[in-house]
Amino acid sequence: MTTTTPDLITRDACVAADQSDPLASFRDRFRLPDGVIYLDGNSLGPLPKQALERARQVIESEWGRDLITSWNTNGWFDLPVRIGTKISRLIGGQAGACVATDTTSINVFKALGAALAVQAEDQPGRKVVISERDNFPTDLYMTEGMVEFLDHGYELKLVDDDSTLDDLLGDDVAVVLFTHVNYRTGRLWDLVGVTQQIHAAGALAIWDLCHSVGALEVAVSEAGADFAIGCTYKYLNGGPGSPAFIWVADRHLARARQPLSGWWGHAKPFDMAVSYAPADGIRRFLCGTQPITSLAMMEVGVDIALSADMALVREKSLALTSLFIGLVEQRLPDHPLTLITPRSHEERGSHVSLRHPDGFAVMKALIANGVLGDYREPEVLRFGITPLYLGYADVWDAVETLRRVLDENLWMAPEFQLREAVT
Ligand SMILES: *Cc1c(COP(=O)(O)O)cnc(C)c1O
């Protein structure tokens, strides 16, 4: 790296910043192991203490004692919509247009199926779906699956270094599926501007909010988005594999049909009718029986996010990511690190990614030394910045550990070269 930040940042300054941090009290709501600086909350958020309590309740009392009556008496049946309504507030959607269910991958399929069906009615000639080569792979895999499954001449085209969205947006485009914050680089799209651009070309916009929800202010309704999806186990701290969500704009809801027409999306599931008739409203985006214990624990994480002022979260996130970048440049100028996260605040999400030719081993050594980030191909060290439980001194200490791992070549140890199933 070449540019340096002018003022030398001291650890004392970081400690002082922590002392006047309006979000500082949130940290106590999470269980975080001693001796660990957790910079991977953008991949799996930590455990909210309250979730343990809720897990005990849903398992012991609701399942253990109330058994099947819980569907009615403990609100199980309404849980996906109740939590969805809360998530809708976090993403600036209207009430009743969001449901917590399934995985993001499955919700990509449902949103895409619904969007393509809307377009097939309104503008039948449009057969192209646009996404990004650099998108999270499952979004592309699910789109490929949909295109092949439909077998009606649909085609996936990708924005990349050689072709911009503008280049690809012709009158053959039905849908654009973009991810708001890129999982690898942390680059943030302009939700409003890009949605306008997509609409101006007559296409519909599906936004993947996996790395945005809980990390920054999102306003899907105001932006005019058509569909949105995202997961809850990252910045919403919902727990491993906790259900994802799907949001649908009001104007599409009444006629949007999704392809996974299971009984939970039926207007009257317990009529046990022979034919499918979609429920009114967002329930039609459900498929089958929901993972209640997982949903219940996830709601705790959603409630914490709702109780935080997202503007403050965003402000602190930008301060911490800027601090991280500044410290790396000041304290590690002589190592082959390349910042791949945009510097401009308007284009930056809530993580910082650095390329290093031996990134994999460097990350393994960092983890062994108590700084948990993660590694993404190719050569990318990824550091998730989560303002609810991370402070300024944490960032200082994490960069200091990175300096030690690099200055002392700790990453060269043979045990850090080995790859496991999950990186
Ligand atoms: C994390 C992430 C996913 C994960 O999808 P799952 O179905 O929950 O495994 C999908 N898309 C994006 C953009 C992500 O960041």
Image: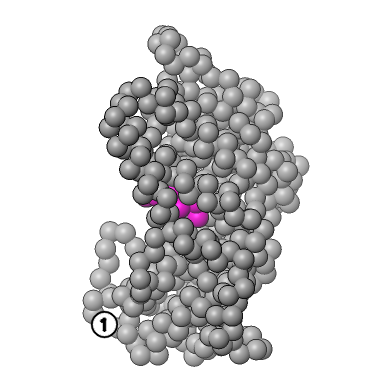
Quadrant of the drawing holding the C terminus: bottom left
Percent from the top left, x then y, of residue 193?
73, 51
Viewer-closest of 423 and 93: 93
Residue 238 forms part of the magenta stretch: yes
In the picture, residue 200 is in which quadrant? top right
Viewer-closest of 59 and 362: 59
Asked whether mark 1 lies closer than 8 Å to ligand 1, one says no
Image: 248 above or below 275:
below
Residue 222 forms part of the magenta stretch: no
Amino acid identity at mark 1: Ala
Q: In this view, does 380 lie to the left or right of 113?
A: left
Viewer-closest of 419 and 53: 53
Count of marks placed on residues: 1
Q: Name the residue under label 1.
A: 413
Q: What colour scheme was applied to this rendering of the protein?
A: one colour
Image: 17 above or below 250:
below
Assign a secondary structure to mark 1.
loop
Q: Which residue is drawn at 37% across and 26% down?
A: 70
Percent from the top left, x then y, of residue 152?
52, 29
Percent from the top left, x then y, of residue 228?
58, 41
Quadrant of the drawing holding the N terminus: bottom right
Q: Give the range drawn in magenta.
A: 235-241
Q: Residue at x 47, y 32 (%)?
A: 79
Q: Which residue is drawn at 58% across and 49% down?
A: 306
